[in-house]
Amino acid sequence: MATDVPELPTLSHDIRTSVCIVGAGIAGMTTAYLLARAGRAVVVIDDGAIGGGETGRTTAHITAALDDMYQKIEKLHGEDGARMAAESHSAAIDRIESIASLEDIDCDFERVDGYLFLAPGNERKLLERELEAAHRAGLSDIEIVDRAPLDSFDTGPALCFPRQAQFHSVKYLNGLARAIIRDGGQLFTGAHAKSIQDGEPAKVTTTAGHVITADNVVVATHSPVNDWVILHTKQAAYRTYVIAARIPRGAVQHGLYWDTLDPYHYVRLQEVDPLLDPGRTEELLIVGGEDHKTGQADDAAERFRRLEEWTRQRFPMISNIDFRWSGQIMEPVDYMAFIGKNPGADKHIFIATGDSGNGITHGTIAGMLLTDLIVGRKNPWSKLYDPSRVTLRATREFLKENLNVAGQYTDWATAGNVDSCDQIAPGTGAVIRRGMTKVAVYRDDQGNIHERSAVCTHLYCIVDWNATERTWDCPCHGSRFDAYGGVVNGPAITPLSEVKPEVPASR
Ligand SMILES: Cc1cc2nc3c(=O)[nH]c(=O)nc-3n(C[C@H](O)[C@H](O)[C@H](O)COP(=O)(O)OP(=O)(O)OC[C@H]3O[C@@H](n4cnc5c(N)ncnc54)[C@H](O)[C@@H]3O)c2cc1C
Ligand code: FES
């Protein structure tokens, strides 16, 4: 089985191709892989590494048990919509399995059962309603069991979703990369798209000034960096937290486990890297949860503490917490991802976004659906995932999220987090008010001060310091910038501006 990471060249020239894909996460790489298999010339660019975005941070539960539950999906999209959702996510699991097998990708792919159990205070009725909705959606093998197969605590009744899956996401993407190159595709990392224009041909221009012209462009940047407003009123960015701890091998049965809390906890097991555990005596227990809207909380330490407490109560066999990390999720207001032609007049720009906590299957669906749309095949799921759709029944959620965004603009009028740079400790950042504007100030580990405008370059909200990731996060639509102002996550496509020198007051 192949495991090596392909070596990639630097983009140093202009290119003409059939399809240019911006973003080398699960959505972009699956699309590139399937298009290359279909005989299209593809070029993939990413400003980081392959899988360096959220796909590299995922906990990779590969499942048709959707975050927002079939009972809610059915209310918004009808029985047909719920059936398409179940069918497409189930097909995505199968497709990942078949690609991993066909391409001989050593990515720890494993079929496991998934269990949804009740959070304290929730009633069995919730599971019963979900069971009925899932059956109506065509998932006929789902059943209620007395408890999930966990010895360390009694979950009480649980919904069992048989034959779901898990894998190591970055190993999988590296396998796709090797196959894309074999099929004639080109991949470039460290190439930031600074503009994406529709046309015949469509055009992607990088920060270094290279231009890729293509019949079609796929923007697979998690949050689309080409669309300025429409899509960003239909989804919201959330931050989620994960811890991982070593446990004795076999102490917990392999499976996917979720509770019904909002935000919910998610649990699974993963092989320990053989370099760290040559005797293969241990496994990693990975637990996530504690989500909040991006840029609207800076209490990561407390969230990690609560996650650890929840885990220790249920899995007392853990000792040290070996890893802690967080990542970003895009939550669509009507629960389904946006995959298809970019809304508006664009003819040759396609997007994949809004994939909630089911981004591995949504990203794979994006690969299948976008390939069909680009090569001109009909796809039965296109209406459900159409980015231009208006789901009137989701109006309440739409208004709630957009009122929340509107509220963030009051940050322009408030004081800074601190009054002066002296109050900022090494390795941390804070927003300071300076006259009419606000400045994002980062003090590096050596004590040097780095200043950028605190005004997000998307739609001008004020960014907030994220101490865990050392990034500036925007509370409005989830743009994120590194400590020095470079873009980490869209929709922003340009860095935080330099701070203009203050105009001295006239005497
Ligand atoms: C902690 C965590 C746990 C999760 N758990 C699960 C789970 O268990 N199951 C599940 O199904 N989903 C899960 N998800 C969600 C899932 O991981 C994501 O939705 C999915 O990986 C997103 O894939 P993507 O390809 O759309 O985006 P990404 O993987 O983020 O890829 C986008 C790429 O675009 C690049 N990019 C952005 N802007 C530009 C630009 N201007 N120029 C060039 N490149 C650019 C980025 O560098 C990045 O590599 C989880 C997410 C997180 C954060
Ligand atoms: S992400 Fe939209 S204003 Fe910052």
Image (cartoon, rainbow, N blue to C red):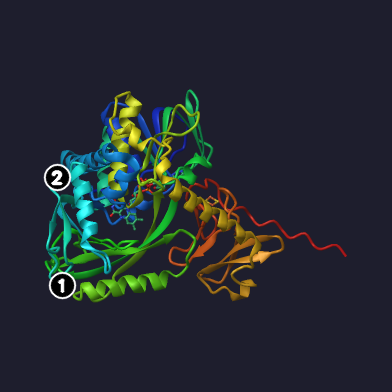
Rendered position, 352 above or below 143? above
Locate residue 292 relative to residue 243 in the image: left or right.
right
Locate residue 276 relative to residue 56 in the image: left or right.
left
Decide which of tag 2 and tag 1 comes sooner along the chain: 2
Q: Camera-side residue: 104 or 244?
A: 244
Disc 2 marks a residue whose amino acid type is Ser
Residue sitting at 59 percent across and 67 percent down? Answer: 449
The disc placed on residue 298 is none
Disc 1 marks a residue whose amino acid type is Ser
Residue sitting at 51 percent across and 50 percent down? Answer: 402
Separation of residues labelled 2 and 1 (CA atoms): 29 Å
Locate residue 452 relative to residue 301 in the image: left or right.
right
- Residue sitting at the far right: 507
CB atoms of marks 2 and 1 within 8 Å: no
The reply to whether residue 166 is visible in this rendering is no
Q: Nearer the viewer, mark 2 or mark 1?
A: 2
Tell me the crowding category of disc 1: few under 14, some 14 to 19, or many 20 or more residues within 10 angstroms, Cα based: few
Rendered position, 179 above or below 249? above
Per the image, label 1 sits on a secondary structure element best described as: loop
- Residue sitting at the far front: 125
Per the image, label 2 sits on a secondary structure element best described as: loop
Q: Camera-side residue: 298 or 105?
A: 298
Rendered position, 135 above or below 433? above
The disc placed on residue 140 is 2
Residue sitting at 44 percent across and 63 percent down? Answer: 469
Across and down, in percent, residue 302 comes to: 40, 73
Q: Camera-side residue: 218 or 114?
A: 114
Q: Camera-side residue: 296 or 449?
A: 296
Across and down, in percent, residue 420 comes to: 64, 72
Across and down, in percent, residue 412 comes to: 63, 59
Which residue is the site of mark 1?
152
Tell me the crowding category of disc 2: few under 14, some 14 to 19, or many 20 or more residues within 10 angstroms, Cα based: few
